[in-house]
């Protein structure tokens, strides 16, 4: 099972980056291999927690797959947890932990652990995991540069 954990510092506020990650409907416009993204439901579990159910259609060449995930935002801990609830993913645990450094800077602890249902696809996926991870992280950084206004 491929997994990775990194910590990265961003020159954006916690709030701005959290909003970027939670704006799932926009993923199709900037994430590599994301052909479509759609929020199915959004509910406030209480004033500090949000649960989003969303579909992502991912694809590469002739391979296309839709998977449904549960995205849970915890405002008190400034964290987002993503798990798969339907699709070709056997196991998915993806966490984002946002740590405020100052009003315009934060560090993000990012962790992902993923395993596909299909044994052969999982082997192939494992070989390209680091490349894909780097491309996805880079796309979030580029999106932040494009849409978040600096407050300096």
Image: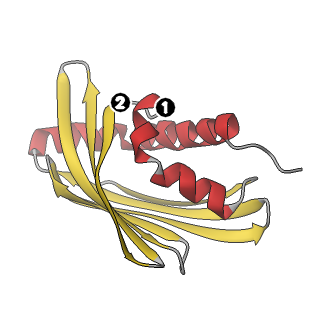
Q: Which residue is mark 1?
A: 30
**113 lies left or right of 138:** left
SS under mark 2:
loop
The answer to whether residue 119 is above or below residue 107 is above
**Disc 1 residue crowd, few under 14, some 14–19, many 20+, Cα 10 Å:** some
**Disc 2 residue crowd, few under 14, some 14–19, many 20+, Cα 10 Å:** some
| Residue 47 is at least partly visible in this image | yes
| Residue 1 is at least partly visible in this image | no
Q: Residue 88, percent across and down? A: 14, 46
Name the residue rendered at 64%, 61% in the picture: 15
SS under mark 1:
loop
Residue 95 in which image quadrant: bottom left
Q: Which residue appears farthest toward the right when viewing the image?
A: 152
Pick whichever, 30 or 49, lies toward us: 49
Name the residue rendered at 27%, 34% in the picture: 58
The answer to whether residue 7 is above or below residue 116 is below
**144 lies left or right of 149:** left
Q: CA distance from mark 2 to mark 1?
A: 9 Å
Residue 149 in which image quadrant: top right
Pick whichever, 7 or 10, lies toward us: 10
Q: Residue 12, percent across and down? A: 72, 54
Q: Which residue is mark 2?
A: 33
């Amino acid at each position: 099972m491929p997994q990775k954990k990194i910590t990265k510092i961003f020159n954006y506020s916690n709030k701005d980056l959290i909003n970027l990650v939670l704006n799932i409907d926009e993923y199709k416009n900037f994430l590599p291999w994301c052909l479509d993204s759609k929020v199915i439901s959004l509910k406030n579990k209480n004033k500090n927690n949000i649960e989003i159910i969303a579909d992502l259609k991912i694809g590469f060449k002739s391979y296309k797959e839709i998977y449904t995930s549960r995205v849970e935002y915890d405002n008190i801990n400034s964290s987002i947890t993503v798990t798969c609830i339907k699709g070709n993913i056997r196991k998915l645990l993806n966490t984002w932990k946002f740590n405020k450094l100052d009003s315009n800077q934060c560090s993000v602890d990012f962790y992902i652990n993923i395993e596909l249902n299909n044994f052969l696809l999982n082997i192939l996926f494992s070989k390209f995991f680091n490349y894909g991870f780097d491309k996805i992280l880079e796309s979030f950084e580029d999106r932040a540069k494009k849409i978040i206004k600096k407050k300096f």
